[in-house]
Amino acid sequence: MKTGTTTTMTMTMRTTTMTKAQQGGVRFLMTRVVVGATAVGTLLGAWAVIAVTSASGEYAETPADDVLALAPESAPASVAQVAAISESQAPGVIVVERQPVVYVTEYVTIPSASNPSAAPAVVTGGTAPAAPASQAVAPPAATDPPAAAVIPALVVPAAPPVAAAIPAPVIPVAPPPIVAPAPTVAPPPPSAPPKPAATSKKSRGS
Amino acid sequence: MPRMLLYLIPFAAVGLIGGAYFASAGPTLPLPDAGQHGAWYASRAAGVASYIFLWLGLVGGLLMSSAWFDGIIGRARLLAVHQSASFAGIALGFSHALILIPDGWTSFGIVDVLIPFGSYYERFATGVGSLALYLGLVVSVSFWFRKRLGMKAWRYLHYSSFLAYVGALWHGLSVGTDSSQPWLVAVYVFTSLLVVFGLVVRLTYTRAARQRPAAA
């Protein structure tokens, strides 16, 4: 009979499914494998994208600083901006430069105390006098006409004279402690003076 | 062997294969040379991948419970996707945190990455990310304990997966190094819109499952 046969087949299929689940088999195993593999693939893909975008150096990466790397184009171009920056920094900072800042990278050899023989490469772009090391870069002399096509030269102050070797501080030697002399044995108290002998002498005045 | 462990076999297999590949080829192949930033990049990538798969698990659960994909994808298969994606997201989340420990680019210790609000860097944002990860783990594991919890309590616990998702999203937006990149912004927008869509469908579109033939 067809009805009975259909019912029998349905029950057989359901029993097979239940048996498989009860045996602890993982249902849709391939689906889970695909999802897991997709997760790994997503990880690798994100890794590649991040490595490529980070290699271009467009943004800071360290968790310590969130400041974007400043490009030379973002340098302040006006005196007001320079003054504002100096005011926002530590008080007492004096802005010496009173003209537009032009960044010129020029490598010079500055003699140091350990290498006094190195000759300073002074870039002569004007007649500015040599300034002491304590002062900032001096502005060019007023007699030099500012040329739009001439980049202000970097004036390197003359090397300060090598300071004489500071003698080693002389630490005064502390005098030896005065040792108190050992207490001497106290002399015995003098014995009572002998009583003067009784005399019959009279006083002279009498 | 407990059934729970059987579900972990696919992930273990994928992990073994991936680990063997990296052990043999190194983390720079076929990726660009990461130099000394390899672990830092890997952690960021794991964070992005974790977010994506947590999202996939959430949306899969929403669409499965709303019967939206009935007739297209079986609910049983969608359940497999929902579970697998959730566990993959949690595994990637732990990878995102643990890779930072031996990384030389940062100074995170085990307390910084595993203890919520124990990090020296962006304490609140990283703490929210840790809590989101732990909440996702609890929600995922609770599936095998729903009879002990009771269906009502388990259902309310499952609803907290939305909190885990929002916490993960907020963590990425706050301290994610790549969150300002256009490609990741697009990912955030797309995934958020789909979550909203899935929630609307879940709340408004319901239909009864197809009636199974009654057993004689």
Image (cartoon, coloured by chain):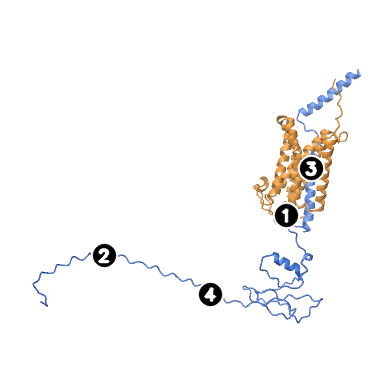
Label 1: state its secondary structure: helix
Point out the residue furthest to the left here: A200
Residue at 68% x, 70% y is A94
Colour chosen for chain B: orange
Between marks 4 and 1, how big is the CA–CA gap?
50 Å
From what the image shows, is residue B32 above or below residue A14?
A: below
Q: Nearer the viewer, mark 4 or mark 1?
A: 4
Which residue appears at 74% of the width and 38% of the height?
Answer: B160
Expressed as whole percent of the image width and height from the top left, the position of residue B59 reads 81, 40
Please tell me whether mark 3 or mark 1 is closer to you in this view.
3
Question: Gap between marks 2 and 1, in whole Å?
Answer: 86 Å
User: What is the three-letter code of the residue carrying label 2?
Assistant: Ala
Q: Amino acid at mark 4?
A: Pro
The residue beneath circle 2 is: A186
Instruction: Kindly indicate whether the residues beneath marks 3 and 2 are on one polypeptide chain.
Output: no
Q: In the figure, A79 relative to B167: above or below?
A: below
Q: Amino acid at mark 3?
A: Trp
Residue hosting label 3 = B55
Task: Give residue B191's position: percent from left, percent from top.
Answer: 82, 45
Q: Which residue was labeled with disc 1?
A: B37
List the residue tagged with mark 4: A167
Question: Mark 4 belongs to which subunit?
Answer: A
Q: Residue furthest front?
A: A206
Residue situated in front as seen by the camera: A187 or B82:
A187
Marks 4/3: CA–CA distance: 73 Å
Q: Quadrant of residue B84?
A: top right
**Are the residues tagged 3 and 2 within 8 Å (C-beta)?**
no
Give me the residue at 75% from left, 36% from top: B158
The nearer-to-camera label among 4 and 3 is 3
Do tags 2 and 1 sit on the same chain? no
Label 3 crowd bin: few (<14), some (14–19), many (20+), radius 10 Å: many
Query: Pointer 2 indicates a residue of which chain?
Result: A
